[in-house]
Amino acid sequence: MGYSKRQFIEAAFAEIGMAGYVFDLQPQDLEQALRRLDAMMAEWNAKGIRLGYPLPSSPQFSDITAQSEVPDSANEAIITNLGIRLAAGYGKAIMPQTMMIAKQAYNTLLSRATFPIPQQLPGTMPAGAGNKPWRVYDNPFLTPPVDPVEAGPDGLIELY
């Protein structure tokens, strides 16, 4: 079970020095932070970093008590980057350590979210001695490359 949205928000406020035991967070502060969290996760989703975060269809439908369902490896990136986004609105200075941790955690997310494209050899390349024509078909060349299909909430699929 992962963090709830409220836990991410409270941890982000603690990261910028506004922990709940010192400052009483008002409901409007939590609501604004929830909108910032949803906006940041929507931006990351648009960049291709899909973590399984439940994005609301509208800000009114966002539930602060909902479980985020993101992997544990993403928690540090979410907390520190949300803290950086919230700090300016409260006039808080961001510590250099927080900036460094946020950058490293975001880079870790990027490295986990990216997958190399499999190499495809051109269709004009000879198949070679190991590919005997009687095994598959009577073509001395490799099969032409196939364009990968992009699918997902923001991917387009064209049918001909």
Image (cartoon, grey):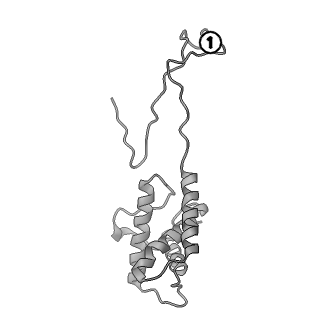
Instruction: Establish if 153 lies above or below 30.
Output: above
Answer few, some or many: residues within 10 Å of disc 1's Cα (few below 14, many 20 plus, some between 14 and 19): few
Q: Nearest the camera: 84 or 43?
A: 84
Instruction: Establish if 31 lies above or below 103.
Output: below
Q: Residue at x 59, y 10 (%)?
A: 133
Q: Secondary structure at mark 1?
A: loop
Instruction: Establish if 75 lies above or below 160.
Output: below
State the image coordinates of residue 48 (x, y, percent, origin top left). Answer: 46, 52
Q: Nearest the camera: 75 or 109?
A: 109
Quadrant the C terminus occupies: top left
Q: Residue at x 40, y 65 (%)?
A: 39
Which residue is situated farthest in the front direction here? 96
State the image coordinates of residue 22 (x, y, percent, origin top left). Answer: 53, 91
Q: Residue at x 58, y 68 (%)?
A: 101
Which residue is situated farthest in the right direction here? 130
Quadrant the N terminus occupies: bottom right
Label 1: which residue? 135
